[in-house]
Image (cartoon, rainbow, N blue to C red):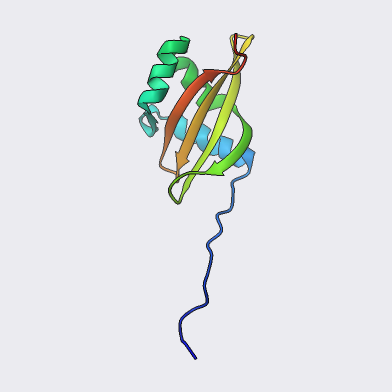
Amino acid sequence: MSDDPPDCQVVAFMPRPRDFEKRLHRLADDSRNIKWSQHARDRMRERDISIRVALHVLRSGVVSGPIIPGKVSGEWKAKVVLTVKGRREVGVVAIAVRDSYIIVKTVEWEDVK
């Protein structure tokens, strides 16, 4: 008989959308907590979406679609959207890394024209 523990599988509990939004809003309140990927910077320039607008989405937007685990334990990824200037929706794909910072993967118009 072995003293080794039985095989265990760690299950990550997905945050609820509202809790994830609150986490992003809190982290985004301090711009130093946000890391912009080169892809996000390129897409914002290409799509004429300013950092100011993307920050507004991170600070006030709502989760749209699923929240999925990131590549590393403690990471959660989701798209956050917000209607800006009363007419167009902007989506920001963000990864919350623990309760430390946000990585912005991309920024896009939701209503492709």
Compared across the picture, whether 89 is left or right of 29 comes to right
Name the residue located 59 percent from the left edge and 48 percent from the top edge: 14
Q: Position of residue 64 (x, y in %)?
A: 63, 30
Q: Nearer the viewer, residue 54 or 59?
A: 54
Query: What is the quadrant of residue 16 in the picture?
Result: top right
* Drawn side of residue 10 relative to residue 97, left or right: right
In this rendering, the answer to whether 95 lies above or below 49 is below
Residue at left offset 60%, top offset 41%:
19
Q: Nearer the viewer, residue 56 or 47?
A: 47
Q: Is residue 26 above or below residue 48?
A: below
Q: Residue at x 56, y 25 (%)?
A: 60
The residue lying toward the viewer, choosing from 29 and 63, is 63
The answer to which quarter of the image holds residue 31 is top left
- Residue 58 drawn at (x, y percent): 51, 27
Whether residue 14 is situated above or below residue 8 in the rendered picture: above
Residue 101, image x, y percentages: 41, 38
Q: How many marks?
A: 0
| 83 over 98 or under it: above or below | above
Q: Quadrant of the C terminus?
A: top right
Q: Position of residue 25 (x, y in %)?
A: 52, 32
- 99 with respect to 68 (left or right): left
Identity of the residue furthest to the bottom in this view: 1
